[in-house]
Image (cartoon, rainbow, N blue to C red):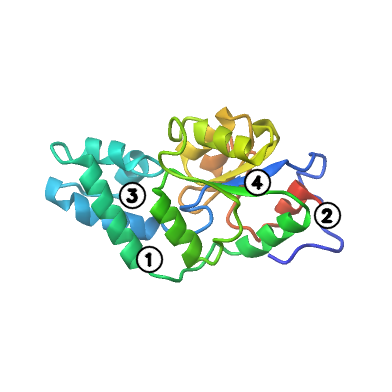
Amino acid sequence: MAAPTRNPPARMADRVAPPAALLFDLDGTLIFSDPLHRAVFAEVLAPWGVDLTEAVYARHVHGRLNADIFADLAPGGDPVALGDAKEAEFRRRLGGQADPLPGAPAFLDWAAAAGIPCAVVTNAPRANAAAMLAAIGLADRFPVVIAEGDAAAAKPDPAPYLLAAARLGVAPGACVVFEDSPAGIRAGLAAGARVVGLATSLPAAQLSALGAWLAITDYTDERLAGIIGPPR
């Protein structure tokens, strides 16, 4: 997204103070990874006869921890071992290069120019977070990465977002959170932050109904200009 430096249109956020920090979920928010996750989950869960339809994926998988997913869908299996196998296969198939969501690198450039720190906050294992950030070329953009096991509880609990804000030294209520899942949106709202929903897996109307302050398709949306204001 090219930073809008001239005659930007009116935006819903023009009257809102710039945030103290931007906190980003990763899967479905910075990288469109859900199709790959779903394919690998389907293969790992096949021995349990799970038909991983879109509805089943949305209800039982999207935004949840592996331990909970496999406990629900693979009774009698070892949730930890199954989760480890699934994530290793995900990383193998991801490879070393992928595309970030459109406009994400430029939006991060614009935030940096405005002096606003950014963090990644994900329920994914740290190895996954590192692999995805490296694959989309954003590994050096986030001084703080909160991954699975770092906080006292996972999303939808607000603990991961509260921890990220604490590590950045900002008030969580002064942050803007970027999320694509119901669990993530609930976590951001419970932390007291404003939440921007990414309509990568769910329709914008559903994100708004969940409480998203703004729902966008990607980071080329001109309404984002009003969130951080002009570079300092």
- Label 4 neighbour load within 10 Å: few <14, some 14-19, many 20+: many
Residue drawn at 59 percent across, 48 percent down: 119
- Circle 2 Cα neighbour tier, 10 Å, few/some/many (<14 / 14–19 / ≥20): some
- Tell me residue 31's x, y (percent): 49, 59
Q: Residue at x 76, y 63 (%)?
A: 3
Q: Position of residue 83 (x, y in %)?
A: 27, 47
Label 3 vs 2, first from the N-terminus:
3
At label 1, the amino acid type is Leu
Task: Say if 145 sits above or below 211 in the image.
Answer: below
Query: Disc 4, disc 1: CB below 8 Å?
Result: no
Q: Would you call the spot at circle 1 few (<14 residues within 10 Å), some (14-19), or many (20 or more)?
A: some
Determine whether, in the image, residue 151 is placed left or right of residue 14. left
The circle on residue 94 is 1
- In three-dimensional space, the C-alpha distance between marks 3 and 2, rounded to whole angstroms, equals 40 Å
Label total for image: 4
- Residue 140, compared with residue 178, is above or below; it is below
- The answer to whether residue 106 is above or below residue 144 is below
Distance from the alpha carbon under mark 4 to that under mark 1? 26 Å
Residue 22 badge: 4
Distance in Å between CA atoms under marks 2 and 1: 36 Å
Please, what is the three-letter code of the amino acid marked with disc 3? Glu
Q: Which amino acid does label 2 sit on?
A: Pro
